[in-house]
Amino acid sequence: MNHEIKLGKLKAMASEVTVVPDYWIANYPGQHNCQQYCLDCCEKHIAGLEKGVHTPERDDRVEEPIPLSEEDKLSVVENPPHVDGGWGSEYDNLPVCSTCDAPLSGSLTDMAVSEELSHHLEVNEGSVLVASPRKAWELESVISNASCEHQASVELLIEKLSF
């Protein structure tokens, strides 16, 4: 299968994935929250902060809400957190919601493209199986954000794609 056909198939599969705008929490109490969210999860986190708890995220390794300190509770009252964003930002990794893992709009930095290309080319020595629309979205995001300096790696990745 030639590269154009593979790219067409990859884009068709990737188009089945619903990509939503990226949001974050402005005025996060006590610290800078560097997480990105879909709108629903962002609003749920803000509701939790207003109730005095930090809602766990995917990587927190806890399942129960974490109580805010008294200082952070005061910060929520004095400087209420709110939803910000809704437009695509630039990311150092594939943009997904920090809570529900939903694909988010946004572009990848050169560093992210380099890391993703290296990962797929090193881990998948034989072929890169595109077994789901989500996998297609991830790969298409990397390919579409690649700069000219990544052209050789992109060509090799496309060559390795298997459907």
Image (cartoon, rainbow, N blue to C red):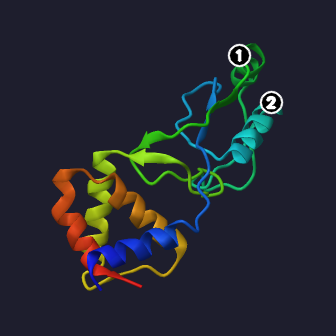
Contact between marks 2 and 1 (CB within 8 A): the answer is: no
Disc assigned to residue 50: 2
Cα separation between marks 2 and 1: 11 Å
Task: From this view, report whether residue 31 is shown above or below residue 63.
Answer: above
Residue nearest the observer in this picture, 32 or 2? 2
Give the residue type that dot 1 points to: Asn
Disc assigned to residue 19: none
**Residue at the location (24% across, 65% down)?**
154
Give the residue type that dot 2 points to: Glu
Residue carrying label 1:
79
When asked about the image quadrant of residue 153, the answer is: bottom left
Residue 89 left/right relative to 116: right
| Residue 59 picture location, percent across and down | 57, 54
Residue nearest the observer in this picture, 140 or 8? 8
Residue 152 left/right relative to 30: left
| Residue 41 picture location, percent across and down | 71, 47
The image quadrant where one finds the C terminus is bottom left
Task: From this view, report whether residue 86 is shown above or below residue 153.
Answer: above
Task: From this view, report whether residue 19 is shown above or below residue 89.
Answer: below
Task: From this view, report whether residue 83 is shown above or below residue 37.
Answer: above
| Residue 57 picture location, percent across and down | 64, 50
**Residue at the location (62% across, 60% down)?**
18
**Residue at the location (27% across, 81% down)?**
2
Q: Secondary structure at mark 1?
A: loop
Q: Alpha-carbon neighbours of circle 1 within 10 Å: few (<14), some, or many (≥20)?
A: few
